[in-house]
Amino acid sequence: MNNKITIHHITRVEGHGNILVDIKDGKIEKVLWEIIEAPRFFEAMVRGRHYTEVARITSRICGICSVGHSITSVKATEDALGIKISEQTEVLRKILLHSENFDSHILHIYFLVAPDLFGAPSVFPLLEGAKEVVLRALKMKNLAHQWGAILAGRTTHPTKIVPGGFSTIPTKEDLLKIKEIILELIPEMEKTLETLSTVLDKIPAFERDTEYMALWNGKEYPLYDGKIQTILSSGEKTLYPVEKYRECTNEYLVEHSTAKFTKNKLDSLMVGALARFNNNYEFLHPEAKKVAEKLGLRPVFTNPFFNTVAQAIECVHSLYDSLEMVEKLIKEGIKEEEIPKPSKYGKGIAVVEVPRGILMHEYEYDEEGYCKGANCIIPTNQNHGNIQKDMEAYLPYLIKEKVSKEELELKLEMLVRAYDPCISCSTHFLKVRFK
Amino acid sequence: MKKKIAFFDFTCCEGCQVELTNLGADKFAGLLNLVEFVEFREVMSEKTGETIDISFIEGSFSREKDRERLIKIRERSKIVVAYGSCATLGGINALKHRKEGWKEFVYGDANFEILNSSKALPISSVIKVDYCLHGCPINREEFLKMAIDLVMDKEPLIPNYPVCVQCKVNETVCRYLLNECCLGLVARAGCGAPCPKDGIPCEACRGFVDNPNLEALKEVIKDKKLQEKLYLFTSNQMEEKDEQ
C-alpha cells in the first residue's frame, strides 16, 4: 500500500487543521496533525486593559465557548482582585455553564458528527431523507441559545457576565422561561438519544490508554469549581491544586502547529466530555446515568470516538441538574445584588470546565486595576497531543484492516471530529511571560 | 434557480458563523427556500467548482499566505460580503497593534515560519468587498435581512447613525450618567444597542459612523476623567485618523 494523504483544512471542525499521512509499502513514514490556524495574540491584547474589559476581550478567543471563556476570565479576575461573589451568582454561573455545554454539544453531535454516522457530507443533504432530524437539530440549537442568552445577554460574546456577578440579574419571569425551555428540550433530547442509538454501531471501535483530566470536587459533577484530577485507564487518580495547573499541563511548542501541546504523566492527555465522564461518573444525575448504562458506557472508557456519546450523556445531565437549580431559585426568590468592588491587586487563577474540556485563565493586575499579564490554557491545546498519538496508534490498525484510501481519510477525520476541536481557540495563547 | 451562497473564514473566532446556527428551524428552513449553501467548511464537507452568487467572508487578513485564498474567493464570486468586525474592520485582532513587539511578547524566542503574522487588516485591504455586515458578533436578523435583499437584487441598507439613537429608542439609561466611557456617540448602529441595555458600555464593535466627532468625544472623556477605550475594536480606524 502506497498512499500520500493530505487533508487540507479539515471540514466540520472549528478552525483550521490539516492531516498529513505518508504510507510507503504499507509502512507509515509520516502521520501528522498539523495546526495552521492564524495566531491572534490575545495575550498581548489584554495587557494594559482595565479589569472590567478583560473578559470581553478574552471572550473573543472563541465564538462557540465564549460564555465559558467569559466566566473563567471573570473568575480569575475576581481571584486576583479579592472580589467575593454571592451564592446566587455562583448558581447562575453553573446554570450558564450547563446551557453552553448543552448548546455546544448539540452543535457538535448534530452538525459536525451526525453526517458521518448517516453517510452524508453535511446536514443539508439530510433535509431530503431525514428532515425531522435536521429540523430538530435547528430547534434544539436555538432553544439552547435562548436558555443561555436569557442569563448572559448574548451567547456569542456575552454582555451580562462581569467581574463580581451580572450586569443585569434575571427576573423571576426569566427563570420561568428557562424552566419552560428545559422542559421543552427534555423530550427533544430523548428523541436525540433514540436517533443516536440507531447509529451507535457506526462509531469505530478503537481503544488507547491515556490520561483523562477534569475538575473534581467530590460533591458534584463539577463545571464551575474544584481541583484538577487525572485518571489513568488503570483507575489510578491524582489530584492537583489549581495553583499547580502549569505542572500538570506542561505546555510545549511543536514546529507544525500554531497551538501548543500539553502532557503530564504519559506522552499525551485528554480533556472534554469523556474525560469528565471518566473522572466524575458517580456524580452524574441519575437520569444521565441511566442513559450511560443504556448506551453501554462505564468508566474508565477508552475509545476516543465515544467522546460524542459522552457529550450526549452530559446533555441529559445538564438538563436535569439545571432544572433542579432553576426550580430552587424560583422557589427561594431571586434578588437584586450590588456588584462587589476589588479589595486587593495581584495574580489570580481560575479553572473551569467548558464544552471541550478544562480551561485555565490566569491574570495579573496592577494597583490601578490594569492587566499586566495573562495566561490561558485552552482545552483543545490539551487534546492536540492526544489526537496525534491516537492517529499514530489507529493508522496501523486501519492499514492492517486493508481499508480503502477514502475510508482511511474518513476514519481519521472522524477521529479528529470526535474531539470537537476548537482550533481557533487553541492558537490564541502561546508563550506567556509576566512583565 | 436558487442563488448559491458560500461562507469562508480567516483570522477570527468563527462566532459569526455560530450566530447563523442560532437562527432557529423556521428562519433557517426559510432561508434554504431562497438560497443553496454550496460551501461552508465548518459544517459542510462539500465544495463547489461553480460560480458563487454571494460569498460571506469572516475574519481578518493577518497573514501574507492567506492573500491567494482571498483572491481566489473573489474570482469565484459575483458578490463578496465581509461579515463580522474582524472582516469589516480588522476588529479585535487589530488590538495587538497597540503593543510594540506583540510577536516577541507572545512567542518569546520561538521562531518557526508558521508563527509569523502581520497586522490584522480588513478583507477590503486585499480584495474588493461589495458590502459590509458589521458587528462582533453580527446581528443575525441583520444578516438575514441583508441576505434576502441581495437575493432579491435589492441594495442593502447599512446604518450610518450612532448607537445613541438606538439607546434613546430603547429608553436605556445613558452610561455617562453612570460615569462610564461609552462609545455609543460615535459608533455605527444597527445592533439595537444591546450592550448599554444589558448594563455595559458600547465598545464600538461595529466601527465608527462615517463622520465621527472624535475630538468632542475625547474632550468629554478628558473632562469627566474617564478611562479611554477608543482602540478596542477600532484600532485600524483610529490609526488612519491619527495619520491624517
Image (spheres, coloured by chain):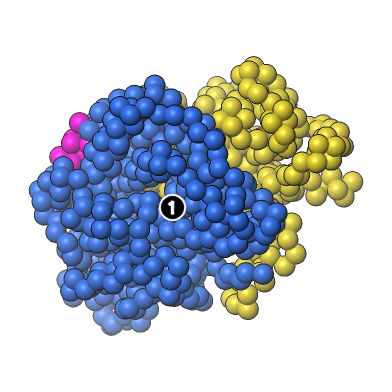
Q: Can residue B5 be found in the magenta stretch?
A: no
The majority secondary structure of the magenta stretch comes to helix
**Is there any visible trace of residue B8 in the rendered image?**
no
Residue at (47%, 45%) from the top-left corner?
A85
Instruction: Name the residue nearer the viewer: A51 or A87.
Output: A87
Question: Which percent across, then down, holds residue B38?
Answer: 44, 41
Compared across the picture, whether B212 is left or right of A192 comes to: right
Determine which quarter of the picture holds residue A388.
bottom left
Relative to residue A358, is residue B229 depicted above or below? above
Task: Give the residue at the far front of this rendering.
Answer: A343
Q: Residue A431: percent from the left, percent from the top?
A: 57, 71
Kind of residue at disc 1: Glu
The boundaries of the magenta stretch are A187-196
Q: Residue tagged by mark 1?
A: A14
Q: Is residue A148 visible?
A: yes
Specify the subunit that label 1 lies on: A
The C terminus of chain A: image quadrant: bottom right
In this rendering, position of residue B30 left or right of residue B162: left
Q: Is residue B127 above or below residue A403?
A: above
Q: Is residue A393 above or below residue A426?
A: below
Q: Observer-nearest residue: B139 or B194?
A: B194
Foreground residue among A177 and B52: A177
- Counting other residues with Cα less than 10 Å from the Cα at mark 1, is it few (<14), some (14-19), or many (20 or more)? many
The colour chain B appears in is yellow
In the image, A257: left or right of A109?
right
Chain coloured blue here: A
